[in-house]
Image (spheres, rainbow, N blue to C red):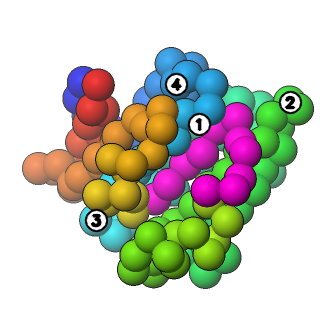
Amino acid sequence: MKYISCSADQTREIAARLVKTFPEGAVICLDGEMGAGKTVFVQGCMKALGYDGRVTSPTFALCNEYSVADKTVLHYDLCRITDKDDLYSTGFYDSEADLTFVEWAGKECDGFENAVKIVISYGEKENERVIELDE
């Protein structure tokens, strides 16, 4: 499935609709170039889930944890993770979450249970993004 977004707000709206379709315990694998809108997508999902706090990229923290409506949501950034040992050291495989977002998931996504793959890329027009959901 493919969606076209012309703004960050529209990307958040698309994400808000899609998050309602993700199964419990899903790992949402987000890939795309730097600045394509991966964190913006997570912001839209979190708002739709009822989270009112700030949602930022976990680039330096590696993982941000959010609690919303008695659910735990984890938000990882794997851009600095080089192999499975590095990923293991983050506690990724030990964590239990109702929903997990993974930016820069790459090939690691193939090994995640309940994975939903989303690629966000630059469109042809300025500010346009193409959001592709691998079903």
Q: Residue furthest top?
A: 21
| Residues under numbered marks 3 and 1 in contact, where contact means CB atoms less than 8 Å apart | no
Rounded to the nearest whole Å, what is the CA distance between mark 2 and mark 4? 16 Å
Rounded to the nearest whole Å, what is the CA distance between mark 4 and mark 3? 23 Å
- Residue 74 image point, x, y percent: 67, 51
User: Which residue appears at 48% of the width and 38% of the height?
Assistant: 113
Q: Is residue 14 left or right of residue 117?
A: right
Region of the chain picked out in magenta, as a range: 93-103
Specify the label residue 69 is tagged with.
Answer: 2
Res 49 quadrant in image: top right
Q: Is residue 54 left or right of residue 124?
A: right
Question: Which of labels 4 and 3 is toward the front?
Answer: 4
Q: Please rate how many residues cluster around mark 1, counting C-alpha atoms within 10 Å: few if below 14, some from 14 to 19, many from 20.
A: many
Rounded to the nearest whole Å, what is the CA distance between mark 2 and mark 3? 32 Å
Residue 22: in magenta span: no
Chain-order first, disc 3 or disc 1: 3
Residue at image mark 4: 22
